[in-house]
Image (cartoon, grey):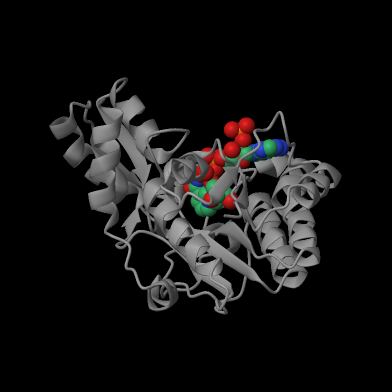
Amino acid sequence: MTTRRILVTGGTGQVGTELLRSRWPSDVELVAPKRGELDLSDADAVAQYADSGGFSIIVNLGAYTGVDSAENDVLQAWKVNALAPAALAAISHKQSVPIIHVSTDYVFDGSKSEIYVEDDCLSPQGVYGASKAGGEQAIRTGNAKHIILRTAWVFSAHGSNFVKTMLNLATQRPTIKVVSDQRGCPTCAADLAEGLSRVINKVLEEDFEAFGTYNFVNSGEATWFTFAEEIFRQAPTHGHASALVEPIPTTDYPTAARRPANSRLSNEKFSNTFGTVPRHWQEALRDVLVALSK
Ligand SMILES: NC(=O)c1ccc[n+]([C@@H]2O[C@H](COP(=O)([O-])OP(=O)(O)OC[C@H]3O[C@@H](n4cnc5c(N)ncnc54)[C@H](OP(=O)(O)O)[C@@H]3O)[C@@H](O)[C@H]2O)c1
């Protein structure tokens, strides 16, 4: 039996950790170089690594995800979020293998009042979103055999995310002010990893043709305020500290990068193509709160 090798970048991140935990057929080997083995800001090294590995598919989860720090770290953000994807797209194209790339809701400016669909116009508001939009474009033009999976508001039991920040703040103060005028779709990293596994397995089938851009988020939507309220509604059941949440407008919580007021993503295209509807984020949140209580 020939082993199918899958290159996974960003394997130490929230999504990568969950993807590496997933079950895989015995002929699949996941190769996930850590930062010390492969620096994603070095596009030449990225190309060389991808070219020499004999990979059947490339999955790019590595990213510069510091939305605010990117504003003052422009070159590094573009190297990791756009040049590395460009290198991976070029090599995967050269080797005639597919590439799967994860992107973000922050490629949109949030001015649309309805839910965002895949072919809405990109109009990022900050360096992170712009560099991720650049990465998307590099993938799209570099290798026709691509899947770009846009996600949003990722949370998990590991890494840095909103759920862990809220639980931590609740141990320090009784009331937390949270922005109530940005709407999005909280997404559990484990559920996204499950979606990615499904995509990878489909793409590895020889007759797969549905390449293109997809959204993948958990069902439901929230503002950061209602997300926090739900965290603290569930928190005591799982032994975590709770806090009162007070809604504030974005103008009362200035950040280096502007964020979209609406970045809700539609799952419809993903569900129709890959045959699964992601569960509600509140249900996924329970699993993460349980994991964090162990
Ligand atoms: N987090 C969110 O809310 C969110 C929302 C929308 C889209 N996304 C997208 O989803 C994907 C996965 O996000 P995530 O939440 O799993 O991110 P994460 O937890 O921040 O992980 C980022 C990963 O990229 C790696 N990385 C960053 N710079 C690197 C470099 N120069 N060289 C090598 N590795 C480097 C990190 O390695 P280290 O562990 O060594 O730092 C880590 O493995 C990304 O494409 C992100 O843009 C995330």
Q: Quadrant of ligand 1?
A: top right
Please name whichever residue, 4 or 165, is drawn nearer the observer in this view of the structure: 4
Where residue 272 sits: x, y (%)? 39, 78
Looking at the figure, which quarter contains the C terminus?
A: top left
Q: Quadrant of residue 145?
A: bottom right
Residue 232 location, quadrant: top left
Q: Is residue 276 above or below residue 196?
A: below
Between 49 and 213, the residue placed more toward the observer is 49
| Residue 9 x, y percent position in the rendering | 63, 45
Looking at the image, residue 154 sits to the left or right of residue 279; the answer is: right
Q: Residue 93, image x and y in percent?
A: 76, 66
In the displayed structure, does residue 260 sit left or right of residue 43?
Answer: left
Residue 284 appearing in the image: yes
Task: Please identify the quadrant where the N terminus is shown.
Answer: bottom right
Residue drawn at 28 percent across, 49 percent down: 284
Q: Please report the residue visible at 70 percent of the width from the left and 74 percent of the height from the top.
A: 144
Res. 68 in view: no
